[in-house]
Image: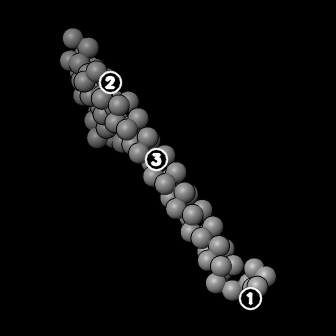
Amino acid sequence: MMDYGYGYGMGAGVFGWIGMALFLGLLILGVVLLVRALSHQTRTSNQPPHDRALGIARERYARGELTKEQYEQLQRDLDA
């Protein structure tokens, strides 16, 4: 008996393609997120400690947590 492409086989094929597309999309997204996380970790670990400390001091000065004198003293201490 011929089913002319209708029935179980047709429905499974459509849902199969949708499922495969979703799976591949999630797989690609996972790889992209993993690469971004690893590159961010590498980028921050390559900075010398005094550069990171100076960046934090700059941020604190910008937020108003440090006075100009405190910030300049930190710069002198970190550059020494």
Measuring 28% from the left and 21% from the top, which residue is drawn there? 48
Q: Secondary structure at mark 2?
A: loop
Q: Vertically, is 26 above or below 40?
A: below
- The residue tagged 1 is 1
Report how far apart the C-alphas of labels 3 and 2 lie in the structure: 23 Å
Of residues 9 and 2, the one drawn nearer to the viewer in this rendering: 2
In the rendering, at what x and y percent does residue 75 appear?
28, 20
- Farthest-out residue, front: 1
- The residue tagged 2 is 46
Q: Vertically, is 20 above or below 40?
A: below
Mark nearer the viewer, 2 or 1: 1
Q: Secondary structure at mark 3?
A: helix
Q: Amino acid at mark 2?
A: Asn
Left or right of residue 54: residue 33: right
Left or right of residue 5: residue 19: left
Q: Amino acid at mark 3?
A: Val
Residue 74, quarter of the rendered image? top left
- Farthest-out residue, right: 4
In the rendering, at what x and y percent does residue 27 appear?
49, 54
Q: Secondary structure at mark 1?
A: loop
Residue 69 visible in the picture: no
- The residue tagged 3 is 31
Query: On the rendered image, what quadrant is the N terminus found in?
Result: bottom right
Mark nearer the viewer, 3 or 2: 3
In the rendering, at what x and y percent does residue 56 appear?
30, 34
